Structure formats: structure tokens, C-alpha cells
Amino acid sequence: AVAVAHFGPTAAHPGANFGQRLADAAAGLSSSGGLAFASNGDLLVGDGFAMAPGQTAQIVRVHNGVQSTFGVTNLGGVYAPSALMTLADDSLLIVDLVANYVAHYDANGLPLAPFASIQPPIAPPGSNFPSDLKLDPDGNIIISVLGATNPPDNRGALWRYDLNGNILDPDNDMTPN
């Protein structure tokens, strides 16, 4: 089992310890990846790495120390949540490392239309391995893509999307700019 450790703030000092360990924020996870906070302070944690048909992962919600599944994320559509981001409306974007897309769930954990597909699509079970997402200074979303193969074929890329999930592709060639 995996736990999400929680360290309290202390001044860095020489040696192996850089903070005082507090109680675990979440415990009993199988493979944690991606952290985000809801506007009410709930911690959201990506959990799982589903690799066989019928397997799914989930987003775990930690509210006042109590863990539960975030909405219906354990019923499909989440396979390897590697990064999470809450948006202004408290909906959640989930970068799925193996599913080749960014899922979008409302504040209650119910699926919305997929946010983005990572191009070019590869026939399942292939993936371009999207791994992380961040807001850029202009308020757009940058998605890090590891790439489908080892160099020199496909070394990965950074894709840019607006907040509606539309790719920003000024030259319209469907490749990262």
C-alpha cells in the first residue's frame, strides 16, 4: 500500500530530514499519482495503474481525514491518473498516462465530455503517455506528453489547450508548436 506523506513546515537544515513528518494525508493507496485540492480544501489523489481489460483506477477524496472515492471515478474512464488540476468551477482535469486523454469530471465526480485527446491517436493499447499539466502565464493549459517511442522517433512534446479543451495550433498541422 502507498501513503501520501504530509510534512509540516520547518527551516531546512543539514542532513536527510527537511521537515517534521505529520500524519499521512492518505493511506492504503495502490499507486498514487497526481494531487489537487478542491476549493473546500479536500485533497484529491490519483490512485491506481490499471493495465488489464476491466481494470480501472480512481481519484480518492480526503475530506477531514476521511478517504472516499471522488464521484464515479472508480467505474471506468480513469486508468493511470498521473496529474490532476482543479479549475475555477471546481471541476477536475485528470491526465491519464495510459488512456491518451485528459478526462474532465464535475465538482461531484461525475464525468463531463473528455477535455482533450492527445494526438496523434494510437490504436489501443498504445498511448503517447500524457504525464502532467499546468497553467501557463496566459491562462492556457500546457500538457506534457512523454511520447510513444524512444528517441529518435517521438521524443514527446508540450501541447497547449485553451480552457475549453481546444488545442492551440497556430499553423493547423495538428502537431505541437
Image (cartoon, rainbow, N blue to C red):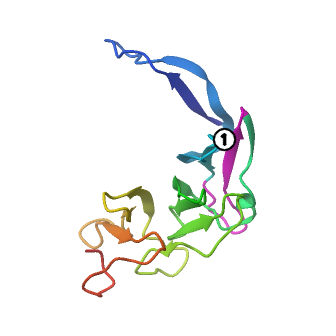
Q: Which residue is mark 1?
A: 29
Q: Residue furthest bottom?
A: 172
Where disc 1 sits, the SS reads strand
Q: Residues within 10 Å of mark 1 (few under 14, many from 20)?
A: some
Residue 67 in which image quadrant = top right
Amino acid bearing label 1:
Leu
Check if residue 112 falls in the magenta segment: no
Left or right of 15 in this view: 114: right
Closer to the camera in the image, 26 or 29: 26
Residue 166 in which image quadrant = bottom left
- Residue 57 % position (x, y): 66, 56
Closer to the camera in the image, 84 or 38: 38
- Residue 153 % position (x, y): 27, 73
Residue name at image x 66 percent, y 63 percent: 106
Q: Residue furthest top?
A: 14
Quarter containing the N terminus: top right
Quarter containing the C terminus: bottom left
Q: Main secondary structure of the magenta part?
A: loop
Residue name at image x 34 percent, y 77 percent: 168
Residue 49 in which image quadrant = bottom right
Residue name at image x 45 percent, y 18 percent: 19
Up the image or down, 90 lies above or below 6; here it is below
Left or right of 78 in this view: 132: left
Left or right of 119 in this view: 172: left
Up the image or down, 38 lies above or below 95; here it is above
Up the image or down, 10 lies above or below 61; here it is above
- Residue 163 % position (x, y): 46, 69
Check if residue 54 falls in the magenta segment: yes
Identify the magenta region: 49-65
- Residue 39 % position (x, y): 60, 47
Residue name at image x 62 percent, y 62 percent: 79
